[in-house]
């Protein structure tokens, strides 16, 4: 397993405000930083990560969100995405609608950690995290690129499988990436199509959801021989893409570009 062990998340100030939907005085539950199904899948139940200035098992790393968001994220994301991951690893392919679901799951999971570490900042100018991850993608749907590469072998010396996110962007909220068991994933704007290595297969979402959106159309190849290779390459590429996405947003802002996609910060 890999994880940014230098990451120290500060607890949210006690104000009974859900970091995902911004409701005040909501009933607060605990959401796992990494979903329990993924922890089980990667055998990282007892893997120690640095969390709030101490080391705890991955399963114990939780973030307070309201009960409604916890329920909605579980229903809309975790069970469907667990099935999609299984289809990918079995080379069964995914549909356009499933590709969108992976994108929004990535945004949700990375976004929860971001909101927790930036409790007094808006995640985007337009959406709270729940709206952004659960609502259909707006008019930039056709500009979202999903890059996926499968992994042939898991190094047995670690005793577990990869499970972690790599993106380091602070301004843009589209780019994100990670390696999970035998699947390496990058979400990017298609503007950076040429920046992504050929070891990943690329799929650009359709401009809008279609009636045939449930047909299997994307069959990613096995591009990495080992999980160690996948983690290294994905991290290096993610750092590069994160910087470029942030620079793009700053450029658009500096020009006061009125047509800037709403999903960008």
Image: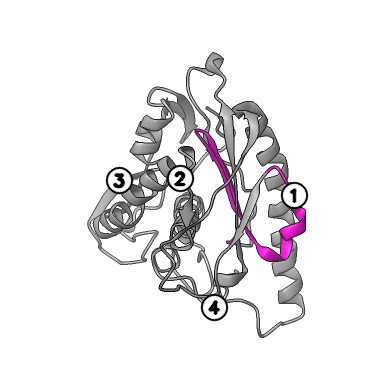
Vertical side of 163 occupied by 79: above or below: below
Query: Measuring 50% from the left and 51% from the top, which residue is drawn there?
Result: 110
Q: Mark 3, mark 1: which one is toward the viewer? A: 1
Query: For the C terminus, which image quadrant?
Result: bottom right
Judging from the image, what secondary structure is the residue with disc 1 in? helix
Label 3–label 2 contact, CB within 8 A: no
Total numbered labels: 4
Question: For residue 230, what is the image quadrant?
Answer: top right
Query: Measuring 70% from the left and 42% from the top, which residue is drawn there?
Result: 199
Q: Is tag 3's residue or tag 2's residue first in the polypeptide sequence?
A: 3
- What range of the chain is rendered magenta? 173-199
Q: Nearer the viewer, residue 264 or 41?
A: 41
Question: For residue 136, what is the image quadrant?
Answer: bottom left
Q: Where residue 139 is drawn, which disc sits there?
A: 4
The image position of residue 163, as x and y in percent, is: 50, 34
Query: Measuring 39% from the left and 59% from the top, which residue is drawn there?
Result: 19
Q: 10 Å neighbourhood of mark 2: few (<14), some, or many (≥20)?
A: some
The image position of residue 180, as x and y in percent, is: 51, 37
Q: Mark 4, mark 2: which one is toward the viewer? A: 2
Kindly report the distance in space between the C-alpha atoms of the residues bearing marks 3 and 4: 33 Å
Q: Report which residue position mark 3 lands on.
A: 30
Side of 222 where 93 appears, left or right: left
Q: Report which residue position mark 1 lands on.
A: 240
């Amino acid at each position: 397993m890999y994880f940014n062990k230098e990451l120290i998340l500060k607890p949210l100030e006690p104000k009974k405000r859900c970091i995902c939907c911004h409701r005040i005085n909501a009933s607060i539950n605990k959401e796992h930083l990494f979903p329990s199904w993924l922890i089980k899948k990667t055998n990282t139940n007892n893997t120690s990560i640095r969390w709030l200035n101490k080391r705890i098992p991955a399963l114990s790393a939780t973030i307070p969100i309201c009960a409604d968001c916890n329920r909605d994220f579980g229903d809309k994301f975790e069970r469907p995405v667990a099935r999609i991951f299984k289809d990918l690893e079995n080379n069964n392919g995914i549909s356009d609608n499933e590709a969108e679901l992976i994108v929004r799951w990535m945004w949700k999971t990375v976004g929860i950690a971001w909101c927790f570490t930036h409790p007094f900042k808006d995640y985007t100018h337009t959406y709270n995290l729940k709206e952004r991850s659960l609502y259909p993608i707006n008019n930039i749907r056709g500009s979202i690129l999903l890059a996926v590469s499968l992994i042939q072998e898991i190094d047995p010396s670690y005793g577990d499988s990869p499970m972690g996110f790599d993106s380091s962007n602070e301004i843009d909220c589209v780019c994100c990436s990670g390696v999970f068991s035998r699947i390496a994933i990058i979400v990017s704007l298609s503007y950076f199509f040429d920046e992504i290595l050929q070891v990943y297969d690329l799929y650009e979402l359709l401009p809008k959801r279609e009636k045939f959106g449930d047909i299997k159309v994307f069959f990613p190849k096995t591009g990495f021989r080992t999980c160690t290779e996948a983690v290294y390459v994905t991290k290096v590429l993610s750092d590069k893409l994160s910087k470029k996405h942030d620079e793009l947003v700053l450029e658009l802002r500096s020009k006061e570009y009125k047509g800037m996609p709403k999903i960008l910060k």
